[in-house]
Amino acid sequence: MKNYVLPVLLLIVSIGSLKAQTDDELIAKTLSDFLEGGTNGEVERFKGAFLKDAVQKAIGNNGVTGMTVESLASKIKPNQKMERTTRVLSVSYANNAATAITETAYTTNKIIDFLNLLKVGNEWKIISRVYSRVDLNEELNTIGNVVAKNKDIPAAKPKVAPKPAKKVSDDGW
């Protein structure tokens, strides 16, 4: 019986020393998987940010369009880095529900993503994505104040941008 005391004590100490990730860190990880996974051609990492049956919608040339996570992921070239920059504009959450806004800029336009997330077990998953392709000079319009509590996730600065001269079509990227 004495032979089990040391291993059990070591197990208890190691479990106690494990730091549980905060919701801020877990949400940041999911958003990183979404943005960096797509940018770096890490298809499985990208798909892992979503709930399997997540909904994605936008306004296209023929009205409201949508696609599955699998369809969107199929546009990513595995292990090939995309020429784009990404950033998180804002994150808000309460208990097990969150909303995030991200920006993905390409050379000629950018996509603004409005993401809804739910905490599923100990992970945050994107459950819906509504997005819009806009000109590079267009900024996010915000009504009211966005307050960032976490210094690692900066708040969006409200700006009013001029309306784009021409409509940019949405294709999910």
Image: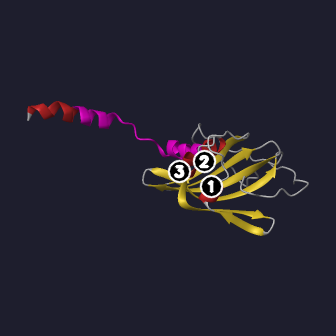
Q: Can you tell which of label 3 and label 1 is closer to the viewer? A: 3
What is the distance, in whole Å, between disc 3 and disc 1 at their CAs? 15 Å
The spot of residue 12 in percent (x, y) is 25, 36
How dense is the environment of label 2, judged by Cα within 10 Å: few (below 14), some, or many (20 and up)? many
- Percent of width and height locating residue 46: 58, 48
Front in this rendered view, residue 155 or 107: 107
Please give the residue where the numbered disc 3 appears in the rendered image.
Answer: 48
Circle nearer the N terminus (3, 2): 2
Left or right: residue 27 compared with residue 79: left
- Height in image: 167 above or below 135? below
Q: Are marks 1 and 2 in contact (CB under 8 Å)?
A: yes
- What separation in Å lies between label 1 and label 2 (alpha carbons)? 10 Å
Determine the secondary structure under disc 2.
helix
Mark 3: which secondary structure?
helix
| Upstream in sequence: badge 3 or badge 1 | 3
Q: Which residue is mark 1?
A: 115
Range of the magenta residues?
10-33
Residue at 79 percent of width and 69 percent of height: 62
Disc 2 marks which amino acid? Phe
Instruction: Say whether residue 103 is left or right of residue 136.
Output: left
Q: Quadrant of residue 108?
A: top right
Residue bearing mark 2 = 34
Q: Which residue reaches farthest bottom?
A: 63
Q: Nearer the viewer, residue 17 or 2?
A: 2
